[in-house]
Image (cartoon, rainbow, N blue to C red):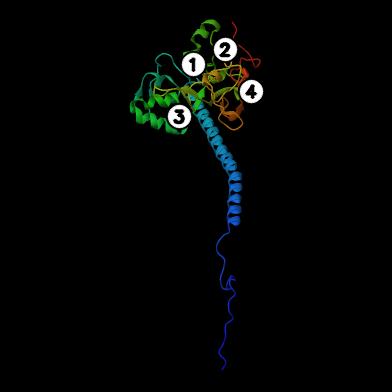
C-alpha cells in the first residue's frame, strides 16, 4: 500500500481547525468607542430617573407634613401649628425618646409636629447624613439639629405665626398671620411648607456652607421687598431667596399647600405674594397700616 501523505502546510496560513479568539487593535478601539457612547447616553437618563425619584419622595414628604399639620389643627380646635415661638411655649414638646425638650428645639415646629408623623424624623430630613455627622460631633445637640434642619421650612410669618419675625409687625399692622384653618382665604394657593436651605456653619468653625434644610421660610415682601432683586442663586446666601431651595428639576421647590395637596413651584411663582397670604391682591403686595 502506498503510504498516506499529508499535504504540507503553507507558511503563514492558519490551520482550518484554528479559530481566531483575539481582537485586533481596531476592533478593540471600536468596542471602547461604542461603550463610551452608551455610557454617555445612559448617565443623563440615570440622573433624570434619580432626580424624578427624589422629587417624588419630597412631594410625598410635603403631603405627609400637610396631613400631620391638619391633624394637629384638628386636635387643637382648628388652631394651626405656629412655626416658631420666641418665648417658652405653653405646651411641652417631647422627642422620640419621650424626653421633654427645652430651648430652641422646643420652640421650632419640627418636634411639635413629630407625634403626628410617628416621630419618623429621619424621613423628614433632606440631609440625614449631616444629622448623623452632627450627632457624632455632639450627641447632646441632636434634638437641636433636627429642629433646625428639617427638609421643609414653614411659612410661619403668615400661617400660624413666627414670633421671631412678626413681633414688630404686629404692633404696626395688627395680626398678620392666620391662627385657625377657618381664617384662610384661597387655601389651595396658600404655601405652608416648602423645600428649604440655610447658609450656616453647623460646627461653628470654618466658612459657612449651604445646608439643604431649614425650619423657616420668609416671604418675598413685608413692608418692602425682602428677597434680592437678582433672583435665586444656588451659590448665594439662602436668606436672599427666603431660605427656599430650588433643588428640584427645572429650578423648582416642593410645596405643601394649606388644602393638603403638594406641587412644584418655580422661581417666578414663588415670588407672588398671593401664594404666601390670602390678604395679598397682587404679586408685589406689601403690608400697609
Labels 3 and 1: the sequence-earlier one:
3
Labels 4 and 3: the sequence-earlier one:
3
Q: Secondary structure at mark 3?
A: helix
* Mark-to-mark CA distance, 1 and 4: 24 Å
* Mark-to-mark CA distance, 1 and 2: 14 Å
For image coordinates 38% across by 26% down, the residue present is 143
Labels 1 and 4: the sequence-earlier one:
1
Q: Secondary structure at mark 2?
A: loop
User: Which tag is nearer the camera, tag 4 or tag 3?
Assistant: 4
* Mark-to-mark CA distance, 2 and 3: 31 Å
Label 4 with label 3: CB-CB less than 8 Å? no
Is residue 236 or residue 240 the one in the foreground? 236
Q: Residue furthest front?
A: 11
* Residue 268 falls left or right of residue 149: right
Q: Residue 106 location, x and y as percent? A: 40, 21
Image quadrant where one finds the C terminus: top right
Image-quadrant location for residue 141 = top left
Labels 4 and 2: the sequence-earlier one:
2
Image quadrant where one finds the N terminus: bottom right
- Residue 162, disc: 1
Is residue 224 or residue 193 the one in the foreground? 224
Q: Secondary structure at mark 4?
A: helix
Q: Label 2, on which residue?
A: 222
* Residue 102 falls left or right of residue 70: left
Q: Secondary structure at mark 1?
A: loop
Label 3 with label 1: CB-CB less than 8 Å? no
**How crowded is the residue under tag 3: few (<14 C-alpha within 10 Å), some, or many (20+)?**
some
* Mark-to-mark CA distance, 4 and 3: 32 Å
Q: Label 3, on which residue?
A: 116
Amino acid at each position: 500500500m502506498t503510504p498516506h501523505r499529508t499535504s504540507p502546510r503553507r507558511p503563514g496560513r492558519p490551520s482550518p481547525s484554528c479559530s481566531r479568539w483575539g481582537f485586533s487593535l481596531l476592533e478593540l478601539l471600536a468596542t471602547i468607542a461604542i461603550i463610551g457612547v452608551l455610557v454617555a447616553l445612559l448617565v443623563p437618563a440615570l440622573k433624570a430617573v434619580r432626580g424624578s425619584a427624589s422629587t417624588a419622595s419630597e412631594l410625598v414628604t410635603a403631603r405627609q407634613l400637610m396631613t400631620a399639620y391638619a391633624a394637629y389643627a384638628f386636635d387643637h380646635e382648628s388652631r394651626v401649628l405656629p412655626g416658631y415661638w420666641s418665648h417658652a411655649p405653653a405646651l411641652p414638646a417631647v422627642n422620640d425618646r419621650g424626653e421633654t425638650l427645652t430651648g430652641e428645639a422646643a420652640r421650632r415646629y419640627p418636634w411639635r409636629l413629630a407625634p403626628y408623623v410617628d416621630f419618623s424624623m429621619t424621613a423628614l430630613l433632606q440631609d440625614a447624613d449631616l444629622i448623623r455627622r452632627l450627632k457624632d460631633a455632639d450627641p447632646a445637640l441632636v434634638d437641636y439639629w433636627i429642629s433646625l434642619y428639617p427638609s421643609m421650612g414653614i411659612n410661619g410669618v403668615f400661617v400660624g405665626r413666627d414670633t421671631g419675625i412678626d413681633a414688630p409687625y404686629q404692633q404696626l399692622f395688627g395680626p398678620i398671620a392666620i391662627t385657625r384653618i377657618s381664617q384662610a382665604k384661597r387655601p389651595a394657593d396658600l404655601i405652608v411648607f416648602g423645600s428649604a436651605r440655610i447658609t450656616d456653619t453647623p460646627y461653628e468653625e470654618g466658612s459657612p456652607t449651604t445646608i439643604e434644610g431649614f425650619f423657616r421660610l420668609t416671604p418675598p415682601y413685608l413692608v418692602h421687598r425682602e428677597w434680592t432683586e437678582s433672583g435665586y442663586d444656588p451659590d448665594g446666601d439662602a436668606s436672599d431667596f427666603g431660605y427656599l431651595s430650588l433643588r428640584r428639576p427645572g429650578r423648582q421647590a416642593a410645596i405643601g399647600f394649606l388644602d393638603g395637596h403638594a406641587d412644584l413651584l418655580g422661581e417666578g411663582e414663588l415670588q407672588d405674594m398671593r401664594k404666601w397670604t390670602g390678604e395679598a391682591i397682587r404679586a408685589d403686595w406689601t403690608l400697609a397700616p
